[in-house]
Image: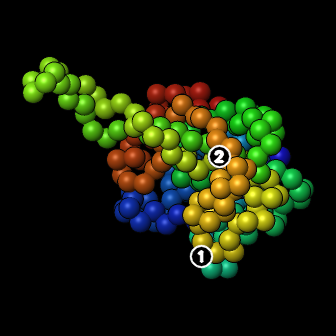
Amino acid sequence: MEAIILAGGKAERLGDASGGVPKPLVPVGGRALAAWQVGLLARSGVKRVIVSCSLGSGEQFAAALAGLGVEIEIAEEPERLGRGGGILFAARLRQESGDVLALNGDELLDIDLATLEQQHRGNGAAATIAVAQPKSPFGVVELEGDRVTGFAEGGTIECWVSCGVYVLGEDALALFPERGDHETTAFPALAAAGRLGAFRHEGLWLTVNTPKDLRRAEEYVAEHPEWLDD
C-alpha cells in the first residue's frame, strides 16, 4: 500500500519556534516532524510515500525525508487546495490503484497501521478513519453535593474525534473535492450512506500546533528513545 502525507501546514501558531520552515519540517528529536510519520509508515511495510506540500517547498521535504527506507514522491500543490484537495492531488501520483493510507505530517502518534488496514479490509467500508478521545486540557474538580472532595488531572474527553489518519478506497477518493475539506464533504456523504468505518486509537496522539505542543513532542521522543530507531 502507498501512503499520502498531508504537509501543507504553515506553522503560523508556532511563530519563531518553527525556524521559518513548514510545520511538518520543524525538528523534533533531531529530525523533521514528518520524518516520524515516514518512519511509522516504513515500519508498517509502506514502500512509497507521496508528500502533498505547498508550491516551492518540495526540495526541502525531499531532503528532510531522504534515507528513511521508503521512496518519497513530492506533490507540490499549484495553489492551496485545502486538506481534501491536497489528498486528491497527491493520490493522482499513485503507481497503484486501490486503498491508500493518508495522514497528517504534523503529528506524533503510535497508531497500529497494520490493524487499521486489516479492519478496513474486513468492514466493507469505502473509507476507514482513525478516531481518538483527546485529553482534556482542564483539571477535574471532584464534588459531593456542594463540597469539593478533591482534585485530579484532566482525563480524556468522552467524545471521539478524527485524528487525521485514514484508509481510503477508490470510491471514497471519487468523492473528494478538488479544493476544500474532505471532512465536511466526502466523509459526511460516506457516513450518510453507511460506508465510513471507524478505528479506535487509544495510544499516543500529539498534534504540534503551538510552542507548548512542540516542547511536549520533544519531551516524548527524549523519554522514548526507541522512536529514534530506523
First in sequence: mark 1 vs mark 2: 1
Residue type (three-letter) at the residue carrying disc 2: Ile
The front one of 215 and 153 is: 153
Residue 204 x, y percent position in the rendering = 52, 34
Name above or below for residue 108 compared with residue 141: below
Q: Quadrant of the rendered structure where residue 42 is?
A: top right
> Residue 30, how many percent across, how many down?
53, 44
Q: What residue would you read off at disc 2?
A: 129
Neighbourhood count class around disc 1 (C-alpha, 10 Å): few under 14, some 14–19, many 20 upward: some
Query: In the drawing, does residue 120 fall left or right of residue 157?
Result: right
Circle 2 Cα neighbour tier, 10 Å, few/some/many (<14 / 14–19 / ≥20): many
**Residue 62 can be seen in this image:** no
Q: Is residue 184 left or right of residue 117?
A: left
**Amino acid type of the residue tagged 1 in the rendering:** Arg
Mark 2 lies on a secondary structure that is: strand
Q: In the displayed orientation, state which residue is furthest to the left.
A: 147
Residue drawn at x 75%, y 58% is 172
Q: Pick whichever, 18 or 91, lies toward us.
A: 91
User: Which residue appears at 47% of the width and 37% of the height?
Assistant: 133
Residue at 81% from the left image edge and 39% from the top image edge: 121
SS class, disc 1:
loop
Q: Position of residue 170 (x, y in %)?
A: 82, 58
* Whole-percent x, y for residue 185 in the image: 62, 66
Q: Residue furthest front?
A: 193
Task: Identify the residue under disc 1.
Answer: 80
Q: Are marks 1 and 2 in contact (CB under 8 Å)?
A: no
Q: Determine whether, in the image, residue 22 is placed left or right of residue 114.
A: left
C-alpha span from label 1 to label 2: 24 Å
In this rendering, the answer to whether 64 lies above or below 137 is: below
